[in-house]
Amino acid sequence: MTTAFDTLTGTLRSRVPELGVDLDTWTRRMMRWHFAPDTASPFWAARRATLGFDPLKDVDGFAALELFGLFDKAELRAAHARDLLPRGYRDRPFRVFETGGTTGAPCRIVNVTRLAYDVEIYRTVLEARGVAGGDVLAMTPGGPHAYGHFVEGLADSWRGAVHAIDFDPRWVKAALRAGGEADAYTAHLIDQTLALLAAERPSLLFTTARLLLELAMRLPRPLHSYGIRAVCTGGTSCTAAEAAFLRQEHLRGVQWIDTYGNTLVGHALQADVTDDGAADGVPAGTGHSYHLPPPFAVLKVVDPGDPWREVAVGERGRVRATTLLEDLFLPNLLERDSAVRTGPHPWFPWDGVAAVRPFQEDGEACAEAVEGVY
C-alpha cells in the first residue's frame, strides 16, 4: 500500500481547521482568550497585573511571547486545577490530567478540547499510514495520565476495544529515586501485556520505547503473529542502536510509529525518510524527525547559554516549548531534553527536532529527571 502523505497536511487542516490559522493570528486569539476577563482562567487573570506589559495590546504575534520570559513550572505545580480552567469553559465538562513526574512533583492541567484535537490529528496520521482501526492494546499509564485517555479516545473514534493493563509509572520512579530498581515492576507490566496478546487479536499496540524493548525480549514469537499491525510509542526514548535492533529483530511486518512530546505540549509527529528525503539537518543514521503541529504548540531548539537564541538547522540545543491552546497556555518552557533542530519535512511544512536525548548541563544529565519506563 502506498502511504498517502502527499495530502496529509491538507487533510489535517480540513479536519482540524485551527491548524490552518497563521501562528501570529492564533497567538493574538489566544491572548484574547487567556487574558480577557470573561474567558481567562483564574491562573492567568491573577498574573496579568504583575506582567509589566499588556498581553492584549503588546503581544502582536508569536515572537512577542518572549515578553513573558521563561515559564517556571513550579507555578503550574502549585496551581489548583480549577484555577487552570478558563472561565470561557465554565459550563463545559472537563478532566484533570497529570504529568508523569519525570522532573519532580507532577503538574496538573485541564482538558476540555485538546484531547479531541490530539485524537483527530493522530487518527489522520494512522489513516495515512494505512493502520487506523481495529482493537488496541494499551500498555500505557492509566489513572490521571493523559496517554491512557488519549488511547481510549482514539479507539472510541472508530469504535475499537481497548485492552488496558494496570500501569502506575510513578511506582517505578519512586523506586529509582530511592536507589532501587525497576525490574520487578517492569516484569509485572510485561506479564499483563503477554496475557492480553495471547488472549486477544489487537491491531495496535501503544506503549513506550523502553517497555517495547523489554516486551521484545520476552515475546515467544514475532509480534505480527499476534495480529499487531503497528506499534505506537511515546514517552521514554531509546538509542539509535536499540531502535535498529527492534526494527531488524522484532518488528518485521509491523510499523513502528513514534512520537516526541509530553502532557504539556502534545504529540510531535514522526516523519520518516521518504523518496523526497528527510528534513534538513537530520543527523546521519537518525532516520526520522519529529514535527509538532502549529499553532497549538511550537518547539524551538535554543542555545543552552541563551534561551532566546534559536540554533541553526543541523545544530544541537535545548528544547524550548510554548503551548497555545484554549485549555492551556504555557509560554517559553525549557524542557529537560536536547535535540537537533531540523527544517521542514515533505510531510510536515514546519521545523522539527531530531536525535532527542536528555539535556546535559556541564556534562551531566539534569539531576532531577527520572525517566523510568514512561
Image: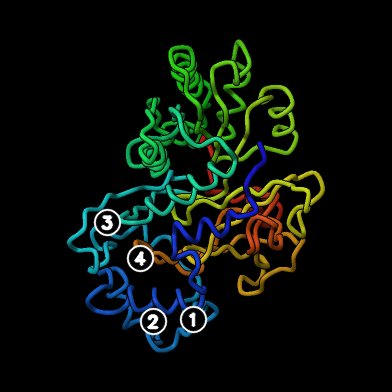
Label 1 element class: helix
Q: Are marks 1 and 2 in contact (CB under 8 Å)?
A: yes
The first of marks 1 and 3 along the sequence is 1
Q: Which residue is label 2 attached to?
A: 51
The first of marks 1 and 2 along the sequence is 2
Left or right of 194, for residue 117:
left
Q: CA distance from mark 1 to mark 4?
A: 20 Å
Quarter-of-image position of residue 256: top right
The first of marks 4 and 3 along the sequence is 3
Percent x, y for residue 155?
40, 36
Instruction: Say what amino acid the circle numbered 3 marks.
Output: Ala
Q: Are marks 3 and 2 in contact (CB under 8 Å)?
A: no
Q: CA distance from mark 1 to mark 3?
A: 25 Å
Label 4 element class: loop
The first of marks 1 and 4 along the sequence is 1
User: Foreground: 192 or 68?
Assistant: 192
Q: Which residue is label 3 attached to?
A: 81
Q: Which residue is label 4 attached to?
A: 326
Instruction: Say what amino acid the circle numbered 4 marks.
Output: Glu
Q: Which residue is label 1 attached to?
A: 67
Q: CA distance from mark 4 to mark 2?
A: 20 Å
